[in-house]
Image: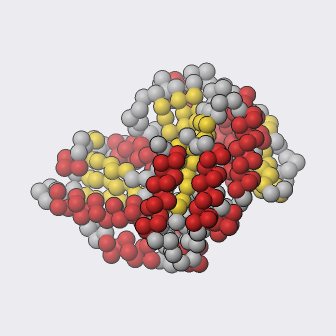
Amino acid sequence: MKYFIQTFGCQMNLADSERIAAYYQARGFKPAASIEEADEIVINTCVVRQQAEDRIYGLVRNIRQRCKANQPRIVITGCLVGAASREPTGMLLKKMKKRLTEVDEFLPIEEVGFSYPQIRVDKTRAWVPVSNGCNNFCTYCIVPFSRGQEISRPFDEIIDEVKDLAARGYKEITFLGQNVNSYGADLIKSKIKDQRSKFYTLSNGRRVKPVMVKHLGKKRIPTLFPYLLEEICKIAKIQKVSFLSANPWDFSDKLIEVIVKNPKIDRHIHLPVQSGDDEILRRMNRWYTASQYLNLIKKIKSKIPNVTFGTDIIVGFPKETKKAFENTVKLCKKVGFRVAYIAKYSPRPGTAADKAFEDNVSYKEKTCRFHILDQLINK
């Protein structure tokens, strides 16, 4: 029996597909070179935008038309399955069942787990998920439904995985998480009651005080992410360590300090801003202002020589006026991003923005704003 995996979406989905491949090979399947050769086709889905969701429906129809002779078994997994099961209105689940009647199985990605080593195509660089899910509930984002609440992998499990990768010749590691720099908050809370005064013992016996991230003058969450980076940098054969994606409100001084002290850590930092306008940021439930974001950028630049930045930006969010968009353009010019992943706002079922705000920026205007930023940053 042969399997074929079609992956949509972000780096986390790519890492998930590596685990799915291991899941199938452990059951005796062999990889197929194409969809036409496969006995079982797995579609690892993305629903962060309507366009990504629509591509899934179109692909299923296309498979049935292309493979009339052998009619492979079709399995849907990933974010669409997760979101359909958790999205509170039930709209997505109803739509999925109605439009995907030809699908043989809906596989929750949680059932794949981390029991099998990932089947990696690249032999020198590896994606390593450190957590899954998100607790932040930005108003536009369906991730808390598609992946659930944030759950961190055990510290020692990650260390052992990277040591094994190093022994097999891997030189570059990229840590992945929806909010990667909040890694460990749930691990800490499950072990100690007072995060401000108690110590946490790492798997190697090292006792550390969890980093309590401060935001807007208040203590927000404890995190172990700076210590995870430190321990990985001690593995001799690992030459470069990167991470995606960091949230501005959880980027602690301790994290900056660890990056400064460890030249192995990538000097390109992906730091999603989403908008440069304070009112739009408030409506997005992003917990910072444009000036606070710029102050963080300034602090990082002052501490880390030759640092560069990438970002995510949404254009055409409800009530994004021309002035609000101009504020985003101004912020981008001040930062000087090396790369930006720009998205046109797309209402997602169950999210706060879909329920509370009218999608009142035309598609034509969204497209215009997309091209302005794309030309400014990604030229």
- The extreme right residue here reads 197
**Res 230 quadrant in image:** top right
Residue 334 located left or right of residue 355: right
Q: Position of residue 323 (x, y in %)?
A: 62, 65
Asked whether 255 or 315 is in front, the reply is 315
Q: Colour scheme in the image?
A: secondary structure
Q: Is residue 10 left or right of residue 260?
A: left
Residue 45 is at least partly visible in this image:
yes
Q: Is residue 342 above or below residue 351?
A: above
Q: Is residue 333 above or below residue 141?
A: above
At a point 39% along the width and 60% down the height, the residue shown is 52
Q: Compared with residue 342, is residue 93 higher up or lower down, i.e. above or below?
A: below
Q: Position of residue 362 (x, y in %)?
A: 46, 71
For image coordinates 72% across by 39% down, the residue present is 300
- Residue 277, image quadrant: bottom right
Q: Residue 16: x percent and y percent?
A: 45, 48
Which residue is more in the foreground, 368 or 87?
368
Please state the total of marks drawn on the protein image: 0
Q: Nearer the viewer, residue 28 or 348?
A: 348
On screen, residue 63 versus residue 111, left or right, reads: left
Q: Position of residue 118 (x, y in %)?
A: 44, 39
Residue located at (39% from left, 53% from top) = 8
Q: Nearer the viewer, residue 346 or 20?
A: 346
Q: Is residue 140 above or below residue 313?
A: below
Tell me, yes or no, if residue 178 can be seen here.
no
Q: Residue furthest top?
A: 236
Examine the image and state in which quarter residue 78 appears: bottom left
Residue located at (65% from left, 69% from top): 283
